[in-house]
């Protein structure tokens, strides 16, 4: 299926041209606008937001610090269970010292009623003199309106400081709120020659302990983990989050199983975290009942005997407020998502070993492309070591991410522009 048409038919339409429509960014940071102190305090706000990853979904993770006379007098981050937003926590801690102070916040303060009243009113009432924003809120209910309200109240607002770093933190939220679909993050642990197992053993231990720990950091940042039934049959995995940091929202385990071949005795049912199995309408009713008896939720979507309609799967996950989906394979599943242009970022965890073998299992299977010219192109945004392994953070040309390296400085995905950069109110 052509990448541009992969989303059609479900109320989603994201051809490449519209994803990167030429919209002028108006909050591009002007380097002279911010000084070293601004960067120092925004880094602190970003570190607070980082600590909230895994604790804020389905809301974005946000950090805020209040600075008066060069000193931090209040700080806070958002956690979904604590209800209040980062700005409210920081302002409450600052008290009267917030008057005349500067607020550094990683995401534009909200201006709409949700579970809480708008944060912009709290900022205005506290007497904040200046607000420095890392990233404009991609939520259409906000999207610059919060900044406009603050400026109308006479508050100086400077936006776009460390915008890239702020965008990384809200990457899944931005994708879900603008498209209705989760950010799709694929991950594979493989050898130097691109294999994930030999012909005799689909070995899940190719990655080092550090590589596996990095994989769990991705599970921390996402709401759902997806594999195909082939992985369940071959590896009998737990599919759980076992990282060191706390995760508030249970990881949704998703299995693509067209004909419901998942054994009811699979280890995936040993953990109380929810299991969602997608199948065809024609799947055997007796198998459906067995899986439901084990606690799984079984949902039918269009598809053939071998594969399911992946956009229908993503649409269902989007309805369930899944912000980020981690696709862990296997080989055919990776091809299915890539060939349809449904991957937003791919993490290749490469171990320093060679498996070889004509029949070894490749990291990406399926039919494959007929030529390099028609193959899906990637840009490597970052590479780094985790123990002996090296990780490539690769963005395909079809990515909907707000930090995709395929986006030029004057374009944004999903047609969502960020507003003006600075104002010294009149």
Image: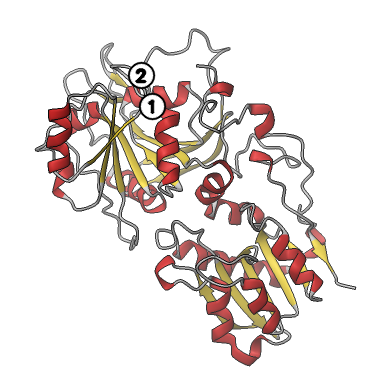
Q: Residue at x 27, y 24 (%)?
A: 258
Q: Residue at x 72, y 61 (%)?
A: 145
Asked if residue 384 is positioned above or below residue 221 in the image, the reply reads: above
Estimate the x, y position of residue 212 in percent, counting from the top left: 30, 45
Estimate the x, y position of residue 398 in percent, counting from the top left: 57, 29
Q: Which mark is residue 365?
A: 2
Residue under label 1: 334
SS at mark 1? helix
* Horizontal arrangement in the rendering, residue 226 relative to residue 221 (left or right): left
Separation of marks 2 and 1 at Cα, in angstroms: 7 Å
SS at mark 2? loop
Q: Residue at x 68, y 83 (%)?
A: 125
Q: Which mark is residue 314?
A: none
Estimate the x, y position of residue 281 in percent, counting from the top left: 28, 25
**Circle 2/circle 1 CB separation < 8 Å:** yes
Asked if residue 414 is positioned above or below residue 29 in the image, the reply reads: above
Q: Is residue 352 visible?
A: no
Callout 1 crowding tier (Cα within 10 Å): few <14, some 14–19, many ≥20: many
* Horizontal arrangement in the rendering, residue 24 relative to residue 392 (left or right): right
Asked if residue 22 is positioned above or below residue 31 in the image, the reply reads: above
Estimate the x, y position of residue 377 in percent, counting from the top left: 56, 24
Residue at the bottom extreme, as displayed: 96
């Amino acid at each position: 299926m052509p990448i541009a048409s992969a989303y059609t038919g479900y109320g989603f339409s994201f051809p490449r041209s519209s994803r990167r429509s030429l919209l002028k960014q108006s909050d591009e940071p002007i380097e002279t606008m911010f000084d070293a102190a601004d960067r120092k305090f925004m880094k602190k706000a970003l570190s607070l937001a980082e600590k909230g990853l895994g604790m804020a979904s389905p809301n974005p993770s946000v950090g805020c610090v209040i600075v008066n006379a060069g000193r931090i007098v209040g700080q806070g981050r958002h956690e979904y269970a604590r209800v209040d937003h980062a700005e409210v926590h920081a302002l409450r801690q600052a008290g009267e010292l917030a008057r005349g102070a500067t607020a550094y916040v990683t995401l534009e303060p909200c201006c709409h009623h949700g579970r809480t009243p708008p944060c912009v009113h709290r900022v205005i009432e506290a007497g904040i003199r200046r607000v420095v924003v890392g990233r404009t809120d991609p939520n259409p209910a906000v999207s610059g309106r919060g900044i406009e309200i603050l400026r109308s109240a006479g508050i100086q607002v400077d936006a776009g400081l460390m915008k890239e770093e702020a965008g990384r933190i809200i990457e899944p939220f931005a994708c879900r709120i603008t498209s209705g679909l989760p950010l799709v993050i694929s991950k594979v642990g493989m050898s130097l020659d691109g294999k994930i197992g030999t012909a005799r053993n689909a070995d899940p231990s190719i990655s080092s302990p550090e590589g596996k720990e990095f994989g769990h950091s991705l599970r921390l940042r996402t709401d759902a983990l997806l594999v195909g039934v082939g992985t369940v049959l071959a590896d009998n995995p737990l599919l759980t989050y076992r990282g060191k940091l706390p995760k508030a929202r249970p990881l949704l385990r998703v299995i693509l199983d067209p004909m419901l071949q998942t054994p009811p005795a699979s280890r995936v049912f040993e953990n109380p975290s929810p299991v969602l199995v997608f199948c065809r309408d024609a799947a055997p009713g007796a198998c459906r009942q067995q899986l439901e008896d084990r606690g799984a939720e079984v949902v039918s979507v269009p598809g053939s005997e071998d594969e399911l309609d992946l956009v229908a799967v993503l649409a269902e996950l989007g309805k369930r407020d899944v912000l980020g989906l981690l696709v862990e394979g296997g080989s055919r599943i990776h091809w299915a998502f890539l060939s349809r242009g449904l991957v937003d970022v791919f993490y290749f965890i490469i171990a320093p070993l060679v498996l070889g073998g004509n029949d070894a299992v490749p990291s990406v299977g399926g039919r494959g492309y007929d030529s390099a010219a028609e193959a899906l192109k990637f840009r490597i945004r970052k590479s780094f070591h985790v123990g002996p392994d090296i990780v490539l953070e690769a963005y395909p040309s079809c990515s909907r991410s707000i930090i995709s390296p395929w986006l030029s400085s004057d374009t944004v995905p999903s047609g969502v522009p960020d507003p003006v950069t600075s104002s010294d109110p009149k």
